[in-house]
Each structure stands twice: as structure tokens, then as C-alpha cells.
Amino acid sequence: MAAPGTDINRPASARRERTGWYFYDWANSAFSTTVLTVFLGPFLTTVTEIAAGCPLGTDDCTGRVHPFGLSIAAGSFYPYVVSLSVFLTVFVLPIMGAIADRAPRKKPLLAGAAFLGAAATIAMVFVTGERYLLGGLLFLIANIAFGAAVVVYNSFLPQIAGPDERDKVSSRGWAIGYLGGGLLLAANLVAVMVLSVDGDDQRTLDIARFCIVSAGVWWAVFTLIPLRRLREHPAAGASVARGNVLTDGFKQLGHTLRSLKAYPLTLFFLLAYLIYNDGIQTVIALASQYGTEELDLEQSTLIITILIVQFLAFGGALMLGAVAARIGAQKTVLLSLVLWLVVIVAAYWLPAGEPLQFMLLGAGIGIVLGGSQALSRSLFSQLIPQGKEGEYYGFYEISDKGTSWLGPLLFGLIFQLTNSYRLGIISLVVFFVVGGILLALVPMRRAITAAGNTPPTLV
């Protein structure tokens, strides 16, 4: 019998629905690239420094701000807000997943979370002067809504693709996301180069603000495509809430937490993913710092490298998806972790002041980045009991976002003890080695069967 959501069941609408699903990756990747990766950190830090009394353009601001009576260094405000958003996300995402599984319709949840996040991003247009608290609040709303929408979005994957199709579908989604995010980022960087005036720091700050706003507009406009094309799928293994969806969602979350021990192999996979994905996220987060502080590279080199990563991740996701079709997703993810190790070792040996070699390293990251993430998502979809897609992807997103402080913490501790960024970057090898070993130990076919699903031909 065909799995629900396969082309056999819905031959006329499957392609249209999948195309709509891909476009949410296209829509929300603008927030990841333009906002989180490039513009928001420097922008919000500058606004905070202005509020702390430092003139615009000050290189070393030692001023402090006092939100809610706390004394905080201006340069620490943005990292603290990021940490707070991660902390709150840990509580929000599983609840959102539980609500998604209990709600009779998922699309309104996707729309609500996506449009809330996009609206908060667009509202950054009002973060002018000394309004750093407004910027921090809007970022909290946008980042939490971003994660909540991804939980609902991911939960559609098992419903629109059968077991043998999910690697391909997930890889295409990631690839299209990297392409969309890269295109908007490229347009914004062109705007920065064309419109900026040397010595006019206020103009540069205003351009950055409108680049952030453009990501919110992009996110909102392209979210309309999946909302139009995705279909509602009745829950296969969970009853729909008859009372209050929110309170029923909390109750269902408690039940899921208690029943997780019934699927130890699913938990074991999550542990492996938690560890190796933490290494991936740390490399992404600290690559710019490593490039500027250790390798003495110009900002223009870092920007070009970011674009290289974005566009090569498009092809990398498709390429590793094709490899998975030949050898299975688990083996392909393990192969990608070996390639990540090569990237880490190469980063350790990179000479300072050599932009071309750093760009080549970025190319290597782009090739393995999209595929390792896309195939991890599709692998996990095989390990979820039917009807609990939202809840389990809520825990998956916690593994993705809620533990991303472990790698930076190790990196920071190594640097503090050795004063060497190179030793800090090479220390990340442990995440890929340990995570890879744990992933290799997961008996994937048995784990899929234990979750009540039919294993694909190749795992």
C-alpha cells in the first residue's frame, strides 16, 4: 500500500504541492542570510552603541546601556539577545509542533508564524536613533516566529513525499532556499556598494536597515506561494483537537515527552544530530570572526565568500541528494561529515592574508553544507511516528537551534586558554568525529520500523 502523500495517491497535485513547499525555503532563507548572517548583528550593535553615548563611527565603544535596570556593555547586547531568543525557542518549538499536530489545519499556523516573523523584520524600519530595545524585541519575535514556522513547514515533508522520495524532496527544498537567500543577499550587497558614501556612517546604517526590511518583505511575499499550493492533510496517527487547540497542544506535548522513551533509536539519532550539527553551526557562525581576526582578511573577502557558500550550497544540496539516491541518506551524511573534517583541517592550515584560499574553503563549505542539512531532515522524517510530525520536528529544531552554544563555548574556552583561533577551530573536529560515530551506530532500518514506518529501498 502506498504511503500517504505519494504521487500514486495524488498524481495530479503532487508536483504543484511540492513546488509550493520548496518555495517556503526560498521565502524564509532571506531572513537567515540577509538578516542573521550579514546585517543585523553590526546594525543592532551600532544602534546600541549610539544609545550608550558613543558617536557613530567609533571603533572601540566602551559605553554601557541599562535595559530594565541592568548594566550591559553595548557590544554585548546583541549576543545576549541571541542567547535569550535561543532560550525561549527551546520552550516554544515543541509546543508549536504539538499544536500543529492537534490543529485541524496546519496552513493557518504556518501563515501566522511566517507573517508574524516577516512583520517584525519589516518593523525594523522604525529602529532608528537610540531605539536598541525596540530592535532587540523585534529580533526576539522574528527569530522565534522563524523557528516556529520551520517546525510546521518541516512537518509537511512526510505528507507530501513517500519514504523513497524524501531525500530528493528535502534536498531540493534546501537547494532552492540557498538560491533564494543568495539572490536577495547579492542584491542587497550591490545596494550597499552602490549607495554607500565613504565617511557617511549614518547613510551606511540606513542602508543596512532597509536591507533588513527587504528580507521581511521577501519572506512575506514568497510565503504566499506555499500557502496557495500546499494542501491540508488529515492526521494519520493523532486525533484532532476538539477543544482549545493551545491547551490540547500542551497536553499532547506532555504525552509525547512521556512516550519518547518508546522510541530510543529516534532519540539516539537526535543525539547524533545534536552533536554534529553543533559543529556545522559553529563553523558557520565563527567563520567570519576567524577570517578577520586570525587570517587578517578584508570585509569584502568575507562578503564574497558568503555568496560563494550560498550559491554552491544550491548545487551541493542537489549533488548530495543524487548521491543519497545511489548509496542511501545515512551513508551520504556520514560522507559529508568526513568532508566537514577536511574543511576544518584545511581551515587550521590556511595562511593569513590569502583571500583566494579562504574563498576556496568557502566553496568546500558550500558543497557539503546544504546536503548534510537536507539529508538529516529527510532521515529524521523516517523516524517519526505518523501523526506526530509537528511535535517531533519541534524537538528536531531544538537540536538544531537550542544547543548551538556548545560549539562556540568550546571555541571560546580554547581561545581563552591558548590565545589561538587556529586551535579553537581545530577543536571542532570532536563534534564531527563523535557525531559521525553515533550516527553510524544507529541501525536506521530497524529504527524506521520501530517508529511504525516502512523503510525506503536505500537508507
Image (tube, helix red, strand yellow):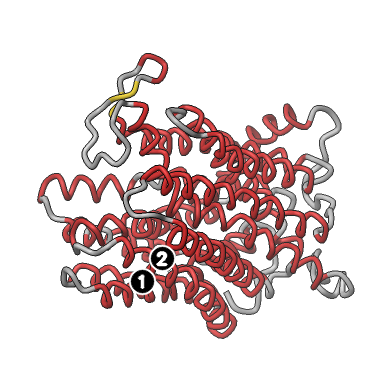
In the displayed orientation, state which residue is furthest to the bottom. Answer: 326
Location of residue 308 by image quarter: bottom left
What amino acid type is highlighted by mark number 1? Gly
Residue at 24% in and 51% down: 411
**Of the pair 65 and 174, the residue shown nearer to us:** 65
Give the answer, above or below, for where 240 lies relative to 9. Answer: above
Left or right, residue 358 beside residue 100:
left
- Depth-wise, is mark 2 or mark 1 nearer the camera? 2
Quadrant where the C terminus is found in the figure: bottom right
In the rendered image, which quarter is residue 446 located in? bottom right
Estimate the x, y position of residue 320 in percent, counting from the top left.
51, 78
Q: Are marks 2 and 1 in contact (CB under 8 Å)?
A: yes
| SS label for mark 1 | helix
Q: CA distance from mark 2 to mark 1?
A: 7 Å
175 over 386 or under it: above or below: below
Earlier in the chain: of badge 2 and badge 1, it is 2
**Is 40 placed left or right of 176 in the picture?**
left
- Residue at numbered disc 1: 362
Identity of the residue furthest to the top in this view: 69
120 vs 262: above or below: above
Numbered disc total: 2
Q: Residues within 10 Å of mark 2 (few under 14, many from 20)?
A: many
Q: Which mark is residue 306?
A: 2
- Viewer-nearest residue: 35 or 413: 35
Q: Residue at x 49, y 50 (%)?
A: 35
Residue drawn at the location 47% of the way across and 71% of the way down: 333
**Residue in the picture at 51% in, 34% down:** 127
Residue 22 drawn at (x, y percent): 68, 65
